[in-house]
């Protein structure tokens, strides 16, 4: 399995350095340049141009992104991400992650500075950094790779922004790092090494996954990309991206198991917990038990990543009134899997259904949400839709959602 290690341990991570490093790794500099200039047209900034240049930073050769022209963005940042993603034909994989990255930035900056003060996010370069990063990954054929990060150098001191002088790391950067569970280093360098956009991209790509096992650098011709930043730091201002291979099947990560025993929570509230934890927890289950004094009760068990740990705990407290939540740290190993789309014709209508396929066993499972919508629209039993999708996978298989 391909593993991409993003190394921001020397000079941190910014959107332009991550994009430049991945562009260099892809080897498709001219293609990326054309794509990004095309997407600028789609968001009404045709007078702005991008260019990648081969440069050197304290003896280290790399690639630097330059943007020429008016950097201001007119309209909604999320609308710009959507329009730019469509114009360069990002796959569903890329578009969803680009949108999630921008939404994370908007949510974080809005919570800290207020929605009326989203200055930096209103720049064209933020859109280019985000959309370009995922396009570079797709062009390099790495959208199925596992992304990991080394500790993130953040710097220290004070930086100037549209909000005035801010401490380093900037509040938005620090909030994103905390939420994603990213490890930090480089606190002795008096510069802003990691920006909010850089932190948001690391969060989306790697989450809290860090390099915890041996990694073999690939034998491919292209295995290293180096993105160079603008500031003179008196040492190489670079972010490196290394392409490696894991000798183990599947991926491994640290997750947390939360448990709380309750014996006085109504059934409707227990059902509501599933809804409240949607988008927060990786998995939720409720197990019947016999509690103290022979009272019937339930064990609420939740699996969550480090970045959303606190949010999940607070949700359980708020919804159940429980007096305590047990927290267990454990390793989770996942088999390699891929999400594909299949086309199935039901009652004369053509539907597309997402299917997760286990690459180890070959087994596949259709998306519950997609099948549920079809069942409602066609008035069919859910199990019938599952069966029809299962029969249609071989005959009507469409391009992988990760490949389109």
Image: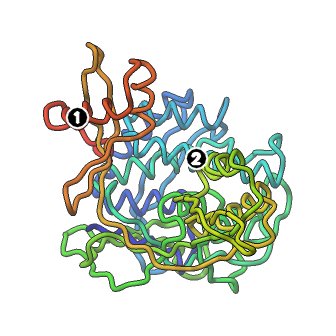
**299 or 395, which is in the foreground?**
299
Q: Say whether disc 1 or disc 2 marks the residue closer to the N-terminus.
A: 2
Residue at numbered disc 1? 398
Q: Quadrant of residue 401?
A: top left
**Residue visible at 41% across and 66% down in the picture:** 147
User: Where 401 falls versus 173 (above or below)?
Assistant: above
Whole-percent x and y of residue 293?
75, 74
Q: CA distance from mark 1 to mark 2?
A: 34 Å
Q: Position of residue 63 (x, y in %)?
A: 41, 63
Look at mark 2 in the image and give the residue it sits on: 125
Instruction: Please determine whether, in this image, residue 261 is positioned above or below residue 39.
Output: below
Q: Residue at x 28, y 44 (%)?
A: 403
- Is residue 105 at least partly visible in the picture? no
**Could you tell whether 116 is left or right of 359 in the image?**
right
Scheme of colours in the image: rainbow
Q: Nearer the viewer, residue 301 or 241?
A: 301
The quarter of the rendered structure image containing the C terminus is top left
Mark 2 element type = helix
Residue 360 or residue 386, whichever sits in front: 386
Q: Quadrant of residue 146?
A: bottom left
SS for callout 1? strand
x and y, in percent, of residue 354 in the image: 34, 39
Q: How many marks?
A: 2
Quadrant in which the N terminus is drawn: bottom left
Place of residue 31 in the rendered image (x, y in percent of width and height, measured from the top left) = 31, 44
> Can the viewer see residue 160 in this picture?
yes
């Amino acid at each position: 399995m391909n593993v991409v290690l993003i190394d921001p341990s020397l000079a941190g991570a910014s959107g332009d350095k991550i994009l430049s490093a991945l562009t260099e790794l892809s080897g498709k500099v001219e293609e990326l340049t054309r794509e990004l200039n095309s997407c600028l047209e789609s968001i009404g900034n045709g007078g702005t141009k991008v260019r990648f240049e081969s440069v050197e930073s304290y003896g280290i050769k790399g690639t630097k992104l330059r943007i020429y022209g008016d950097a201001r963005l007119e309209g909604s940042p999320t609308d710009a991400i959507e329009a730019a993603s469509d114009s360069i034909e990002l796959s569903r994989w890329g578009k969803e992650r680009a949108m999630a990255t921008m939404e994370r930035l908007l949510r974080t900056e809005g919570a800290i500075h207020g929605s009326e003060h989203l200055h930096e996010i209103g720049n064209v370069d933020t859109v280019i950094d985000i959309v370009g990063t995922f396009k570079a990954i797709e062009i390099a054929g790495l959208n199925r790779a596992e992304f990991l990060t080394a500790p993130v150098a953040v710097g220290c001191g004070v930086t100037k922004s549209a909000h005035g002088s801010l401490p380093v790391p900037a509040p938005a950067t620090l909030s994103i790092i905390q939420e994603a569970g990213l490890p930090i280093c480089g606190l002795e360098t008096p510069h802003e090494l990691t920006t909010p956009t850089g932190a948001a991209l690391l969060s989306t790509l790697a989450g809290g996954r860090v390099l915890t096992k041996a990694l073999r650098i690939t034998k491919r011709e292209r295995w290293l990309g180096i993105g160079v930043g603008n500031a003179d730091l008196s040492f190489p201002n670079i972010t490196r991206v290394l392409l490696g291979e894991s000798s183990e099947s599947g991926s491994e990560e640290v997750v947390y198991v939360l448990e709380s025993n309750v014996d006085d929570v109504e059934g409707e509230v227990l059902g509501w917990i599933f809804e409240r934890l949607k988008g927060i927890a990786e998995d939720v289950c409720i197990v019947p038990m016999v509690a103290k004094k022979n009272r019937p009760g339930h064990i609420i068990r939740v699996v969550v990543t480090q970045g959303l740990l606190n949010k999940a705990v607070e949700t359980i407290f708020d919804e159940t009134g429980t007096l305590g939540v047990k927290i267990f740290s454990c390793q989770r190993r996942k088999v390699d899997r891929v999400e594909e789309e299949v086309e199935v014709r039901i009652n004369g209508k053509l539907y597309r259904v997402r299917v997760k396929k286990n690459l180890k066993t070959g087994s596949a499972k259709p998306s519950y949400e997609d099948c549920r919508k079809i069942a409602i629209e066609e008035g069919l039993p859910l199990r019938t839709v599952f069966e029809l999708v299962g029969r249609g996978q071989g005959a009507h298989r469409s391009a992988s959602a990760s490949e389109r």
